[in-house]
Image (cartoon, coloured by chain):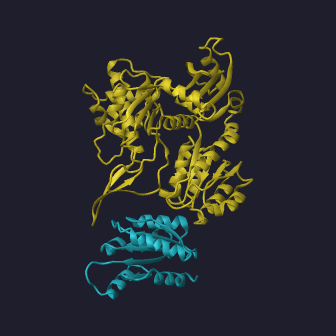
Amino acid sequence: MKALLIDFGSTFTKVALANLDPPGLIGTAQAVTTTSTDLLDGLRTALAEFSRGELEGIAVKRACSSAAGGLGIVAIGLVPVLTAKAAREAALGAGARVLATYAYTLTSREIEEIRSLRPDMLLLAGGADGGEQRTILDNAALIAESGLGVPVVYAGNKVAADRAEELLTGRVPRVIVAANVMPEVNVLQTEPARQAIRELYLQEITKAKGLERIQQEVGLAMPTPLAVMRGGELLQRTWKQTVVMVDIGGATTDIHSFGDGKPSAAGVILKGLPEPFVKRTVEGDLGMRLSAASLLHSVGVERLQEQLPFLLENGELQDYVNWISASKDALPRNGRELLIERALAIACIREAIVRHAGRLEEAFTPSGRMWIQQGKDLTRVDLLVGIGGVLAHAGDPFDMLRQALKIEDSLALTPKHPQLYLDRHYLLAAIGLLSDIYPQAAEALLGETLAPSEV
Amino acid sequence: MPQTNTIVLGVIGADVHAVGNKILEMTFSDAGFKVVNLGVMVSQEEFINAAVETDASAILVSSLYGHGEMDCRGLRDQCRESGIGDILLYVGGNLVIGKRTFSPVEALFKEMGFDRVYPPGVMPDVAIADLRKDLGL
């Protein structure tokens, strides 16, 4: 028995073919994604790399997709650091691209902004259970009147759920009511909303995006980031280690962390909304192609110069960045550009990790100096996995990761000495697709694709 | 002003006195209030955010370490800015340092916008009775 696992990416359609019993990777292949014509064309091209014999006996077909913009969600809550943040975490945890997050009552301008963002779905939160309900009901009414025509997941105050559902039904294509993302103050509950988002994705979004045929023919199961996340969850569960995964793409850099991130030192007080055990952040301004210009803007020339063994010429970096941002498949043309590429990747990873990890803040109390922690403490994370072409094709991926983890800021709770791994066959999404139906095979593939650094 | 029985409780500022806070949580819960306890080292912002999300009727601020005046200043204005200007504000504990008579301290905190101010040694029952009265429960 074999499994065919497909990732329809925005640039490439990546295919993995694996034996299930005994489990093992047969091979991987990729072809340019054909969004303009039929996604299946690109898939056929990729499959042509396998022999006829290899393609016999496929019992399972499963796919994930981030093509056609992935799953775009607008998150809406009440207080920015409470329900709005909880809604955002839930959407990210469902593998979505969060296009924007709004707090309090939506204004007519914000409704127009949402319209122009063209989200696939709205996630509506606000109020703890039994708490404030005027705002979420106002927002439900505003969404109903707006004619946005976008399905809604309601995950706010349970007391207002029936009324909100009534307001929205018939005015938007679909409403699903899920349990509150923040049932009590400072309690985060993202799982029900994540499930509702996935349900809606499978039933409505694939239809809207013309992915129905893909769903029927190859079993489109989830957005790609969710598949990658599930691969990471399996890794955390089966290896019983805390994990951080860094996924560098052309347009975004995703960081996933798997662990509770509680304070690791004494005298630290945890503040704010708790962090999800599985946390994902997406940095839309950090990427190796489409977002290279914003990456340069975010980190600055000086930080990049630090990683280079030669002095940059005036305008050299800007010229290179201009060139790669304009073309998805631009590759470094000489040794100098290769080193610039490496420096960009290191900066990208470092910045994304700093943003994902928690921070300490000093507080002086009559009982001495204390520390307040916001976010996750990842300093003692066991494993760090690098994903993405720029690492997989680099000559020294582990050195790049080590450089990226050298962070002078002592208040940033970033991983200090994790064991480093590389997803060398780009299999984590495929593993995530398999993890709930064939967990043992998925586990075997983890062992095959994850290459450790030499200690 | 909302007339729910939800109250937000916490120890303000850089104050880490946790025991009284637990006792207040217990006694107010036993008295039938829905208590949102934020614990110790709570900022003004956290009190207000929690009150907004839960539609609370009152914020009960404790301060045991003598910096209460500094920590509580501006809380009423922050509430007004956040759309909950009418919420009941109670404060109690060791609000100031040194042996000062209570009435000027009470006047000071009322001036700052607190509805009830309690000196050290007041039993929770007193505040519970006041809260019932103020909320018309």
Is residue A125 found left or right of A393 in the rendered image?
A: right
Q: Residue at x 54, y 82 (%)?
A: B132
| Quadrant of the rendered image containing residue A337 | top left
| Quadrant of the rendered image containing residue A399 | top left
Residue A98 shows up from this direction: no
Q: Is residue A140 placed above or below B128 in the rendered structure?
A: above
Q: Give the percent coordinates (x, y) of residue A441.
A: 58, 27
Q: Which chain is yellow?
A: A
Q: Give the percent coordinates (x, y) of residue A445.
A: 53, 25
Q: Nearer the viewer, residue A86 or B23?
A: B23
Q: Nearer the viewer, residue A15 or A80?
A: A15
| Quadrant of the rendered image containing residue A136 | bottom right
Residue A208 shows up from this direction: yes
Is residue A33 found left or right of A422 in the rendered image?
A: right
The picture's colour for chain B is: cyan
Q: Is residue B131 placed above or below A73 in the rendered structure?
A: below
- Image quarter where the N terminus of chain A lies is top right
Count all numbered tags in the image, as a single digit.
0
- Image quarter where the C terminus of chain A lies is top left
Q: Nearer the viewer, residue A288 or A410?
A: A410
Q: Give the percent coordinates (x, y) of residue A52.
A: 66, 11
